[in-house]
């Protein structure tokens, strides 16, 4: 539930007992449950109204697709990733990388790289 384990849930219950007290805790819990139920019902009603007003061509519409990250991933990156996976041949494993530096002894001249200059 929301990524919470038993120790976190117990800590939340203890904090709720300290904040609300044992007399008002049942009332606060029922009010929180009622509020969550109302929010869930409002979200479901908004989704059903949106689906009803958009018409049959948007039958599979998901409001989460309007999130910019989801939109870009779905419409732009899926095709690219699919093409990459289709075009990618089975390559042998890579060799270990060459170190970016070379140990030189005292007095040695460093190697000359034509491409670096």
Image: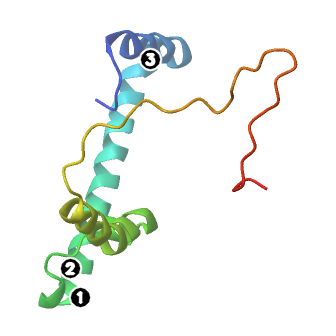
**Label 3: how many residues lie within 10 Å, few (<14), some (14-19) or many (20+)?**
few
SS at mark 1 in the image: helix
Q: Give the number of the disc on residue 54.
A: 1
**Image quarter hosting the N terminus:** top left
Q: Which residue is mark 2?
A: 51
**Which image quarter: residue 60?**
bottom left
Mark 1: few/some/many CA within 10 Å (<14, 14-19, 20+): few
Helix, strand or loop at label 3? It is helix
Q: Earlier in the sequence, mark 3 or mark 1?
A: 3
Q: Position of residue 56 (x, y in %)?
A: 12, 89
For the residues labelled 2 and 3, the Cα–Cα distance comes to 38 Å
Q: Are marks 3 and 1 in contact (CB under 8 Å)?
A: no
| Image-quadrant location for residue 117 | bottom right
Query: Is 99 rendered above or below residue 84?
Result: above
Q: How did the renderer colour the structure?
A: rainbow
Residue found 32% across the figure and 38% down from its top: 33
Residue 49 position in % (x across, y down): 24, 78
Q: Nearer the viewer, residue 52 or 92?
A: 92
Q: Is residue 47 above or below residue 100?
A: below
62 to 12, vertically: above or below? below
Q: Which residue is mark 3?
A: 12
Q: Is residue 106 left or right of residue 92?
A: right
- What residue is drawn where x is 38% and y is 9%? 7
**Front one among 27 and 54:** 54
């Amino acid at each position: 539930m929301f990524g919470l384990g038993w120790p976190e849930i117990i800590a939340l219950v203890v904090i709720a007992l300290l904040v609300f007290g044992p007399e008002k805790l049942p009332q606060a819990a029922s009010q929180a449950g009622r509020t969550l139920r109302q929010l869930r019902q409002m979200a479901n009603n908004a989704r059903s109204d949106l689906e009803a007003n958009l018409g049959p061509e948007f039958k599979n519409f998901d409001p989460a697709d309007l999130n910019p990250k989801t939109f870009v991933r779905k419409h732009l990156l899926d095709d690219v990733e699919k093409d990459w996976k289709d075009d990618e041949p089975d390559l042998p494993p890579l060799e270990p990388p060459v170190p970016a530096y070379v140990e030189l002894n005292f007095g040695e001249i460093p190697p000359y790289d034509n491409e670096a200059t």
